Amino acid sequence: MDNNIKIKIDEIMEEICKIPDLNAKVDILTYMEQQAGFQLWQLEEDFRVDQNMKNI
């Protein structure tokens, strides 16, 4: 993993830990999980398309 990305993720997590409202933390982490899931889905789809193009 790119070290700069890891640093940014760690910084975001530190900011989230500072939030005192538990409901806000849950909302933020749920949003992050949804966004990560969507990004993963897009990458998997791009990978499938790339593999299909190689098989043609």
Image (spheres, rainbow, N blue to C red):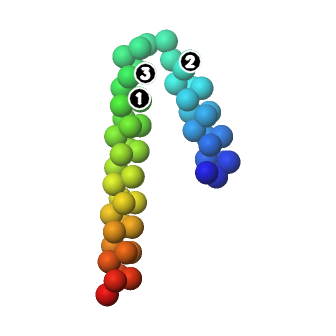
Q: Secondary structure at mark 3?
A: helix
Viewer-closest of 13 and 20: 13
Q: Which mark is residue 54?
A: none
Name of the residue lying farthest toward the bottom: 56
Q: Could you tell me how far apart the alpha carbons at marks 1 and 3 are, in whole angstroms?
A: 5 Å
Q: Could you tell me how far apart the alpha carbons at marks 3 and 2 are, in whole angstroms?
A: 9 Å
Residue 12: x percent and y percent? 56, 33
Residue 17: x percent and y percent? 54, 20
Kindly indicate whether the residue at mark 3 contacts the one at mark 1 (C-beta within 8 angstroms): yes
Q: Which amino acid, mark 3?
A: Lys
Q: Which amino acid, mark 1?
A: Ile
Q: Secondary structure at mark 2?
A: loop
Q: Which residue is mark 1?
A: 28
Residue 54: x percent and y percent? 38, 82
Q: Which amino acid, mark 2?
A: Lys
Q: Which residue is mark 2?
A: 18
Q: Can you tell which quarter of the image residue 50 is in?
A: bottom left
- In this rendering, would 42 be left or right of 6? left
Q: Residue at x 43, y 13 (%)?
A: 21
Q: Quarter holding the C terminus?
A: bottom left
Q: Residue at x 32, y 77 (%)?
A: 52
In this rendering, the answer to whether 33 lies above or below 16 is below
Q: Which mark is residue 25?
A: 3
